[in-house]
Image (spheres, helix red, strand yellow):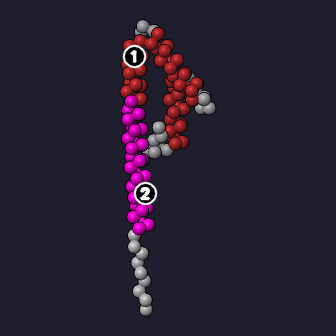
Amino acid sequence: MSNPAIGPEREAQLRRRALARLTGRIDPANPRANSAAALGVLYELASSPATAADALALLHEIQVHQVEVQLQDEELRRSLAELEDDLVRHIRLYDLAPTPVEAQP
């Protein structure tokens, strides 16, 4: 999801930095490979008894964030539909508004 407050270029830069920090490598052309790499890191954490609890906590946080993003997406789609309805209503009002008649001298 895009964040209009920071802009798409800055968001992409932040994503690349986060991915590099997480996996040690970047492949901006293949986002599925990046997701697979992140899941690989999570799997490695879950496989070790020393870090399994942290991995489960991280997985829970990811799931919570996923639900939050889905809820935000639903709200944005609802808002967009309302805005489109308002736009149509205003266009109709404008089209049906009486035109002022100029005074004849």
The amino acid type of the residue labelled 2 equals Val
Give 32 or 81, whichever is nearer the viewer: 81
Query: What residue do we see at 42% from left, 16% from top?
Result: 55
Is 90 inside the magenta-drawn segment?
yes
Instruction: Return the x and y of residue 97 as percentages of the image width and height.
Output: 39, 70
In the displayed structure, 30 sits above or below 94; it is above
Label 1 Cα crowd, 10 Å radius (few <14 / some 14-19 / many 20+): some
Q: Which residues are magenta?
A: 67-96
Residue toward you, 98 or 74: 98
Quarter occupied by residue 59: top left
> In the rendered view, does 66 fall on the left or right side of 27?
left
Contact flag, marks 2 and 1 (Cβ < 8 Å):
no
Q: For numbered disc 2, what is the local secondary structure? A: helix
Q: Which mark is residue 56?
A: 1
Instruction: State the predominant SS element of the stretch in magenta.
Output: helix
Q: Which residue is mark 2?
A: 88
Q: Which numbered disc covers residue 47? A: none
Which secondary structure, mark 1?
helix
Mark 2 vs 1, N-terminal side: 1
The amino acid beneath tag 1 is Leu
What residue do we see at 39% from left, 58% from top?
A: 89
28 left or right, relative to 18: right
Query: What residue lies at 38% left-to-right and 49% top-to-bottom?
Result: 82
Q: Position of residue 44 (x, y in %)?
A: 49, 13
